[in-house]
Image (cartoon, grey):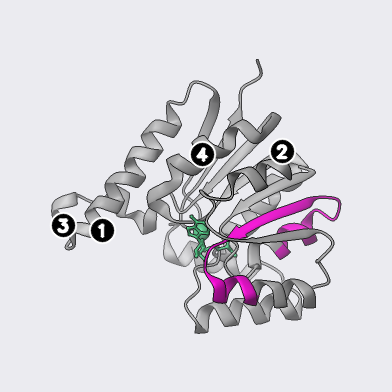
Amino acid sequence: MLLQNVEQYVEKLIPKRTELVEEMEAYAKEYVVPIMELIGIETLLQILRLHQPKHILEIGTAIGYSAIRMAEALPNAQIVTVERNETRYEKAQTFIERANKKEQITTLFGDALELIDEIARKGPYDAVFIDAAKGQYQRFFEHYQPLLNKNGIIISDNILFKGHVATDLAEIETRRKRSLIKKIDGYNNWLMNHPDFYTTILPIGDGIAISIKRGD
Ligand code: SAH
Ligand code: MG
């Protein structure tokens, strides 16, 4: 989302990760798993270090990359993460075990819109990270915002959809993509005007929205 040369410059400055984390990055590249981009994850982790959540809910585990990175950055936090794709869920279990983070990360298999009761029993949460099916963000937000503690935050990833949200719809070739763009744009507008949250959009990685629950 940044100018490409600036992005490359910043990426190069980011220190090496652990061997396992870099193995996951390579795995994601090889098998085209949409884990967070390098600058995006660094930004997410820094926001979490500032906020210091004790209980985090992640929607969209994929192979456990962001969950493991959050667990490393916040050794005192407990993370609940949900994934509906079985292959990825299993891969995440393996990586989490290898990272020695089983005590800190609870992985749930299933659709985040169907596991609401189970996820609620494990809550409440200080931070919710939405990083799953882009067409469903508003539903995830509406279902999970009641589980937030006071001063809780919700972080939504991929809300700029590679910049497509800023493209003229007439230039988008497939109907499916146009519909997805409209949904994300709808979410962004709805979110920015939500009366109970302060939201800001960071044009970093694939676009990250930070929403902070207003005090009552
Ligand atoms: N957070 C991960 C990347 C997640 S990619 C990281 O940065 O490392 C998005 C994942 O969300 C995909 O693996 C997809 O299978 C999963 N997903 C999409 N919709 C979902 C839903 N409704 N419930 C659970 N998982 C979902
Ligand atoms: Mg993402």
Q: Earlier in the sequence, mark 2 or mark 3?
A: 2
Q: Quadrant of the N terminus?
A: bottom left
Residue 67: mark in rendering: none
Q: Position of residue 87 (x, y in %)?
A: 56, 77
Three-letter amino acid code of the residue under disc 2: Asp
**Identity of the amino acid at label 3?**
Glu
- Badge 2 vs badge 3, beta-carbon distance below 8 Å: no
Q: CA distance from mark 1 to mark 2?
A: 33 Å
Foreground label between 1 and 3: 1
Query: Which residue position is annotated with label 1?
Result: 177
State the residue position of label 3.
171
**Going by the image, does 74 lie left or right of 167?**
right
Q: Nearer the viewer, residue 35 or 8?
A: 35
- Name the residue tied to disc 2: 126
Contact between marks 1 and 3 (CB within 8 A): the answer is no
The residue at which mark 4 appears reads as 141
Q: Which residues are magenta?
A: 68-91
Q: CB of mark 1 within 8 Å of CB of mark 4? A: no
Q: Nearer the viewer, mark 4 or mark 3?
A: 4
> Which of pointers 1 and 3 lies earlier in the amino acid sequence?
3
- Disc 1 crowd rating (10 Å Cα; few below 14, some 14-19, many 20+) is few
Under circle 4, the secondary element is: helix
* Residue occupying the point 61% across, 70% down: 89
Marks 4 and 3, the one that precedes in the sequence: 4
Q: Nearer the viewer, residue 195 or 92?
A: 92
Residue 135 against residue 145 in the figure, above or below: below
Residue at the far bottom in the pictured view: 30
Question: Residue 157, percent across and down?
Answer: 51, 51
Residue 10 rendering spot, x and y as whole percentages? 58, 63
Q: Residue at x 57, y 67 (%)?
A: 62
Q: Indicate the amino acid at tag 4.
A: Phe
Alpha-carbon distance for marks 1 and 4?
22 Å
